[in-house]
């Protein structure tokens, strides 16, 4: 009898473990659309109500992952954003490679990752974003010399420490892509304090440098900066996270904030997760942001961001 009860207890524990892991897996695969309206003082009237979709950290581990992410983007096309921004980390080593200590420095792993991201990026050719589709790279995106070519197939422009000016009815909105490393003075100095600049980077580790950089002539150069990279820690228990993060990534772990008059957003990532497709107390997410003009901060609000 003791043996039978022992087996039953072991089986029950195994079933609980299976259900728990299943729940964590589902949490990594259900992508939430986060809506926000941001009021910008410098937004030109011609861009009032414009929307942008920010998607970061696809981290496809296989061709099947890349195709699933492409299907996700096809579903998100129904949101009809004016601008699409992609925040880096398009493919990553799988669990087997990670357990064996293999990374993007391995030629075979890098080649497989490049092939996976090509499947994803090329599928974006049919994604409509009338004002443009733009992307930044992560420091460890495989074969960076091929990344811009893969993006071009999908109609996406890589902004590696560069900016592009969008024009509508004679007015301008600047999109600036922050490189994963390096000095930001040239990128920031190309803007004037009165320009409306939306910048984005792969990791919030770039926030401090971006906030201290100055526009040509002085002053803040960006009105809003978006980033991903942290996955929200992927699995969180109190202050502990599954992923090893830098001090700056922990400081800007996830969500909206405002510093020095600049809106900052760290996304928890738009797809599964690094290596293990499991999440705990975090959520896969993408962000649809509506831009509004703000001669003054809306009454009753202190930060100028309305969440829905």
Image: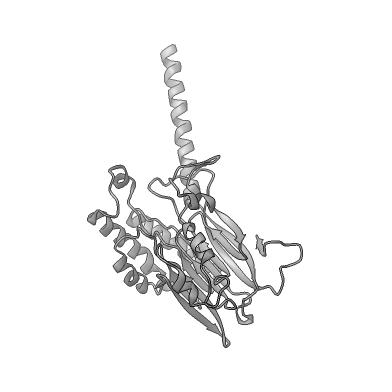
Check the image and report above or below for 135 versus 266: below
- Residue 16, given in percent of the width and then of the height, sits at 48, 32
Check the image and report above or below for 248 versus 8: below
- Residue 295, given in percent of the width and then of the height, sits at 70, 75
- Residue 266, given in percent of the width and then of the height, sits at 53, 57
Q: Nearer the viewer, residue 198 or 278?
A: 198
Q: Farthest residue toward the top? A: 1
Q: Farthest residue toward the right? A: 299
Q: Residue at x 42, y 58 (%)?
A: 58
Check the image and report above or below for 304 versus 12: below
- Residue 133, given in percent of the width and then of the height, sits at 45, 73
Q: Nearer the viewer, residue 166 or 59?
A: 166
Q: Nearer the viewer, residue 174 or 292?
A: 174
Q: Residue at x 58, y 59 (%)?
A: 34
Please say whether residue 11 is visible from this viewpoint. Answer: yes
Please say whether residue 81 is visible from this viewpoint. Answer: no
Q: In the visual, does 198 lie left or right of 298?
A: left
């Amino acid at each position: 009898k003791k043996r039978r009860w022992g087996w039953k207890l072991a089986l029950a524990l195994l079933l609980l473990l299976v259900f728990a892991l299943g729940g964590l897996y589902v949490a990594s695969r259900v992508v939430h659309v986060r809506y926000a309206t941001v009021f910008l003082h410098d937004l030109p009237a011609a861009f009032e109500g414009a929307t942008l979709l920010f998607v970061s950290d696809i981290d496809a581990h296989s061709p099947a992952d890349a195709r699933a992410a492409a299907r996700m983007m096809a579903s998100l096309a129904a949101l009809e954003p004016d601008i699409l921004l992609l925040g880096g980390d398009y493919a990553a080593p799988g669990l087997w490679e990670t357990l064996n200590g293999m990374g993007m420095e391995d030629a075979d792993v890098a080649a497989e990752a490049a092939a996976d991201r090509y499947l994803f990026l090329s599928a974006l050719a049919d994604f409509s974003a009338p004002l443009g589709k733009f992307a930044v790279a992560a420091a460890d995106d495989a074969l960076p010399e091929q990344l811009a070519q893969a993006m071009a197939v999908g109609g996406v422009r890589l902004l590696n420490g560069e900016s592009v000016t969008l024009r509508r009815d004679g007015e301008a909105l600047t999109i600036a892509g922050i490189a994963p490393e390096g000095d930001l003075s040239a990128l920031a100095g190309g803007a004037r304090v009165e320009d409306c600049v939306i910048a984005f980077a792969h990791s919030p580790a770039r926030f401090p440098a971006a906030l201290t950089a100055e526009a040509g002539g002085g002053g803040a150069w960006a009105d809003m900066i978006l980033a991903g990279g942290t996955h929200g820690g992927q699995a969180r228990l109190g202050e502990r996270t599954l992923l090893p993060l830098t001090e700056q990534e922990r400081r800007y772990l996830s969500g909206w904030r405002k510093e020095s008059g600049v809106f900052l957003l760290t996304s928890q990532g738009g797809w599964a997760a690094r290596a293990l497709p499991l999440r705990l107390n975090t959520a896969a997410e993408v962000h649809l942001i509506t831009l509004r003009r703000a001669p003054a901060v809306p009454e009753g609000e202190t930060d100028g961001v309305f969440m829905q």
